[in-house]
Image (tube, grey):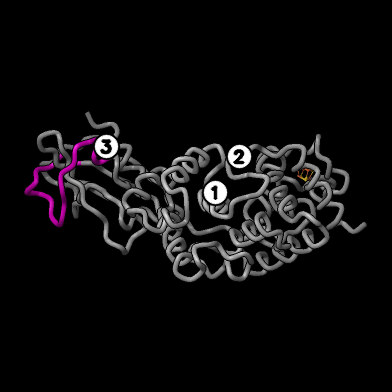
Amino acid sequence: MDRFNTFRISIEAYYLANKRDLPWRKKVPIPYEVWLSEIILQQTRVAQGTPYYNKIRAAFPTIEALAHAEEDKLLALWTGLGYYNRARNLQKGARQILADFNGKLPENYSDLLKITGIGPYTAAAIASICFKEKIGVVDGNVYRVLSRYFGITTPTNSTAGQKEFQAVANECIQQTKEPDVYNQGIMEFGALHCTPKKPNCMYCSLSTTCHAFNSGTVTELPVKLKKGKRTKETLHFGVVLSEQRVALTKRGTESIWAGLYEFPQLTEAPEHGQLLSEPKVHKLSHKELHCSFWEVSEAEISGDFNFYTKEEALELGMPIIIADFVTNMP
Ligand code: SF4
């Protein structure tokens, strides 16, 4: 038996014995639920993402409901998950499915890729889990497992690496009758067993044939090219309180926080404003935001803003750093 097949059989057995019971894992999976869960779980762990999945699924039970949702409501439910473009693209995708695909997710990989927000990973997940198509999923967990087991040293964040890992993933899935089991198996195995820092090699059904384990290179794989440092950006927010209400403004379309509500920004630290807390640091993928919150008067802020009570504000979509501040307001 070739190595791809040996690997694939072990991964499938692992999944059948260890799979977690999750709300979107059904005997007959519902494509909308699989799509929603996959988008939420990008950049988010299952334990953290599942309550969000439950809330959003309950608020928008169908693709149609999601397409017609008020953006503010969707973003409010998304607050805390970060990467808000995922939520906006999810809704764009839902609208596109209504307009171009009769309200149903397309049933194959190449048509799934036409939907806004669905990239190769999500398309492969939906196509294999819901429609049994044999396209291997590749994400951070999969890079790690494949690089260790097969001894692949090509950097995972290089174009050559992405091609090579996709080819290996596709090779592994070719001989199965259950592409849904294999794909979910490798994701589960990476998330629970062959983890970044403490892989459980001592009790691993793959250890006798695992390249990294047998060559003592587990901690060296996968290889990743170093990225540049995050750039630092300082933001000063003006907090105007008036009769138990606070001024908030909605961000325009051209930013990572597009469509979210925040305190009006000041161009610099105000001379006479009172600093309401120590500056807070918020890390994004490419930037490190140092945020200061100043108590200022209405005359010191500009642009469009409205006043909201704390309860009303918490119903709006806000970047987590703003939502945390509002939550802790008296
Ligand atoms: S032996 Fe260790 S490194 Fe190899 S697949 Fe198993 S857990 Fe991962």
Kind of residue sitting beneath label 2: Leu
Who comes first in sequence, dot 2 or dot 1?
A: 2
Near-viewer residue (39 or 168): 39
Residue at disc 1, secondary structure: helix
Image-quadrant location for residue 278 = top left
Residue drawn 45% across the image and 61% down it: 94
Residue at disc 2, secondary structure: loop
Q: Which residue is mark 1?
A: 37
The numbered dot on residue 326 is: 3
- State yes or no: discs 2 and 1 in contact (Cβ < 8 Å): yes
The numbered dot on residue 22 is: 2
Give the alpha-carbon distance from disc 2 to disc 1, as whole Å: 10 Å
Residue drawn 85% across the image and 56% down it: 5
Residue drawn 70% across the image and 63% down it: 135
Stretch in magenta: 294-313
Residue drawn 49% across the image and 63% down it: 103
